[in-house]
Amino acid sequence: MTLSSAASTVNAPYGPSASGAAQLPPREFCVTTRVASDADEQARNLSGWRQTYDQLTPGAFAGSVSELCLEHMTVFCETTSHALRQTCEVGSDAYWFGLPLKNNGPGLINGNLIADDALAVMRGRDEFELMTSSGYRILGIVIEEAELRLHAEEVERIDFSGEVLGQQILNVGAACKAGLCDALSMLLLTTQTSSQPLSCIARRNVQSSVLAMLFDLGVPLKTDDLPERKSKSDRYWIVMQARDYILAHRDRPVAIPELCRQFHVSRRTLQYCFEETLGMTPMSYLRAIRLNGARRDLCAMSARPSKTVQSVAADWGFWHLSQFATDYRKLFGKRPSEALREALGG
């Protein structure tokens, strides 16, 4: 999916400050797209990076960066028309995960091939060389190291392995990589077409979803991927307490990380407990509760006519609008747009 074809919002580039240190990305909470007709301009268009691009093949250059900056994470898609040699350094105290999309030619990081079943990873402050072919597209995730470690400790409840992330190339499997690429592309495209920035709740949901997808890749970011051992009574207690907590806060979307922190269990253990006790995943249960919350907001739309289906969906943690519409219709037998028309007397 080529994100650069969507309507673009061109902002002033962010890059090195006068002192040479990389500046923090802006926090606009919506997708911005910056286009470039020069390799040097392209290098400046990615927020928070210090980069130099050398064009290696002849012809007029064209490039773009579509970027979503959140509180502790940036997700972006970069497209470049010509082969490049890139000298790159992400901002300090962060990790970069690079996922090349299907391209005509290879991409190399420090001389190592980034294969179709692999992703690249680099720690902030470590300069690296990226060689890309003509017509190259790559997705990127930049995460603050503190946020990555906090998620590992409080949600995954595992020991974060910084040594693994020093390997530069992580083999994750072609199917898993393709699934993450599809999800990130849809996130950028959906957010780019929205008329409003992501709400605070939607931003938290996006960040936790991306982190969960990274840990689900099978990458050994951890020392032990087995769920904690709990007795049957403990598993039942966890599910009942989680359910009561969700229902007590049904006026807002509760996310998996919140439950993990509240009841001091890992995401994998929470899933195991729900599947055994209720026969469904916690995500499925939460989705149903959030869909009901969205339905109530849509039905009350006459009191807030400025709201849209997309903004209601985002408020309830659904950033994939078409999936939200599919799930809504499956549960309630009508599309959310129909519920909105009925509420507005249409």
Image: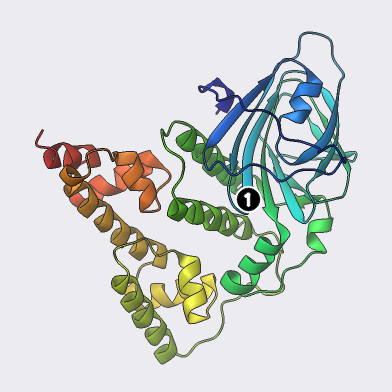
Location of residue 167 by image quarter: bottom right
Residue toward you, 142 or 99? 142
Quarter the N terminus occupies: top right
Left-right relation of 238 to 222? left
Side of 262 relative to 84 (left or right)? left
Q: Residue drawn 29% across and 38% down? A: 308
Query: Residue most toward the left?
Result: 345
Residue under the point 67% across and 28% down: 12
Q: In percent of the image, x 70 and y 69: which residue is there?
A: 222
- What kind of colouring is applied to the model shown? rainbow
Q: Residue 336: name its quadrant.
A: top left
Question: Is residue 331 among the parts visible in the rendering?
Answer: no
Q: Which residue is mark 1?
A: 73
Estimate how packed mark 1 is, as few (under 14), some (14 to 19) or many (20 or more) residues with alpha carbons within 10 Å: many
**Residue 211 position (above or below residue 16):** below
Q: What is the secondary structure assignment of the residue under circle 1? A: strand
**Relative image position of residue 263 (x, y in whole percent):** 47, 80
Q: 100 or 86: which is nearer to us?
A: 86
Q: Amino acid at mark 1?
A: Met
Residue drawn at x 61%, y 36% as measured from the top left: 67
Viewport quadrant of the C terminus: top left
